[in-house]
Amino acid sequence: MANNGHSNGHANGHGGAHGYGVIGGEASEQEVTQQLVGRVFTTSQPFMLAVLVLGVLFVLGIVAFAIKAADGFDDRSNWGYYVATFSFLITVFGSAPVVAIAFRITKNHFRRAASRASEMFALVGVLSTLMFIPLIALLPSFEGRRSIWFEVPMHGSLPGYADFASVIVLVVCGLALLYVSALPDMAAVSGRGAGPIRSLLYTGLVKHWRGTERQWAVHKGLLAILGALYFMMLIFVHMLVSADFSLAMVPGWIDAIMPAHHALAGLQSGLAAVVVTAFILRTWCGYREYIGRDFFWSCSKLLLAMSLLWGYFWFAEFNTFWYGRKPEEQENVKFLMVGTYALPFYLNMFGNFLIPFGMLIWNHVRRCVIGPTIAACFILVGTLFMMIRFYVPASSITDLGVHSIVDTRASHPEELAAIWPGALDILLILGGISGALLIFLLGTRLLPVLSVWEIKEGLLYQVMRPLLRGRYLVLGKPE
């Protein structure tokens, strides 16, 4: 650990309250533990109201799924919005833990208050896994058509099970990452009046944790290994889901950039989800002293860069089709972008690129709390419509044996008509997103939503020192 520090800005009295500190004020380690761990056992009225609303919407989504399932899974066009909802959960909430992984690798200080919230989105993977099971029945045979499985012998729903296995590995890796990261905090929670049920749970999970120097070294190594595995599996899942449930479903849609674009949208929207979560925790949940403005300032630069990168990836996709001028390529552009599904495409374009870019190029917008948060909200909405324009059109085509969308328009023009959401589709979307948020909220009653051990570690790197009439926060640099 280097002892040399650098001035990180003026902090008159309480660094965290003004946005420059790693933690609030000059709290001691004991005060940090007491404040953050104690909130796990307190339940406010707004929290219960949020749980009630999300629970009702989640139940309505389950009812909508049951009604659709009563008609069977033979008609794939009836399940396009369900596939889009699943993909949205994987794209946004499945990618959110990468924020903690990436920020931990770069060893910055501002990430400490948001790491746990980022990792807790791994809990949503349980819902994503359950939602994937019906998709196995929806995936048609790959025999006689183009797919990424061209060298693999096709036996029934083998690719669907392979995709399912990859999702399970991703979810297990994410839960393992959360468990290892939260292990020191669970040990702290277990000894502070957790109640009989939670105490029994914590005792089984942390019985081997003693906080020795060797255990901390293993803890650090496991976080690095699990983080690398999670990131690799996430990209792999993005490739499989986007290729099998979207790209391979549209005859003649040959696009090597699309899976990478799909993964990039996940990284962009995952960061956006963490920014919005940090804003809610700071504004309404009493964590203002722990989540400073420096977190939003730093994330705004990344959101700007990812928005530009999103625009570049889209232009590379579009330019390939536009410049080629083949009939099937022009039909794909009309079908997926500027024609049949023009509305979700434009909402996607404005939400993921034009609006965030137009906002975040301005310094005064990036340097406030509300500016990056609004841009992040637009990114999340844009990502939802990106999933709709990828998966709903692909679900409408049943004649998969042809090699060109031109042939589909000639033989089955009704398959290229737009499918707009009905009441059940809307309930499915709201129910899936509400279920994910409900799982996250319930997780905050088991684990501190802020990483106690990382914030306490930050105390070792910071000190408030007087200079002339003010006091300044001096931060040390990690090893």
Image (cartoon, grey):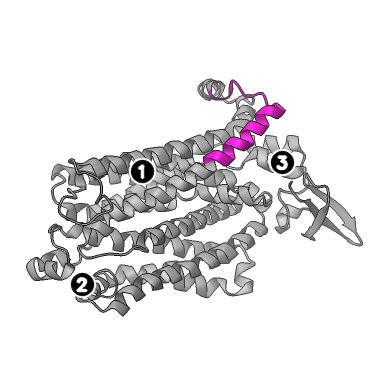
The residue tagged with tag 2: helix, strand or loop? helix
Q: Secondary structure at mark 3?
A: helix
Q: What span is in magenta?
A: 205-226
The question of residue 341 being in magenta is answered with no
| Numbered tag placed on residue 128 in the rendering | 1
Q: How far is mark 2 from mark 1, CA to CA?
A: 34 Å
> Which of the two marks, 2 or 3, is nearer to us in this view?
2
Res. 358 mark: none
Q: Please name whichever residue, 288 or 243, is drawn nearer the observer in this view of the structure.
A: 243
* 357 sits to left or right of 402: right
Q: Which of the two discs, 2 and 1, sits closer to the camera?
A: 2
The amino acid pointed to by label 1 is: Ser
Q: Identify residue for label 2.
A: 328
Residue 370 vertical placement versus 240 (above, below)? below
Measured as percent of width and height from the top left, residue 311 is found at: 44, 71
Counting residues from the N terminus, which is met first, the one under dot 3 or under dot 1?
Answer: 1
The residues tagged by marks 3 and 1 sit, at their Cα atoms, a distance apart of 33 Å
Question: Which residue sits furthest left?
Answer: 411
Residue at x 75%, y 37% (from the top left corner)? 29
Residue 294 appears left or right of 316: right
The answer to whether one can see residue 442 in this image is no
Which residue is disc 3 drawn over?
457
Q: Residue at x 77, y 42 (%)?
A: 460
Q: Pointer 1: residues within 10 angstroms few (<14), some, or many (20+)?
A: many
Q: Nearer the viewer, residue 375 or 128?
A: 128
State whether residue 107 is above or below residue 164: below
Real-space CA distance between mark 2 and mark 3, rounded to the nearest whole angstrom: 57 Å
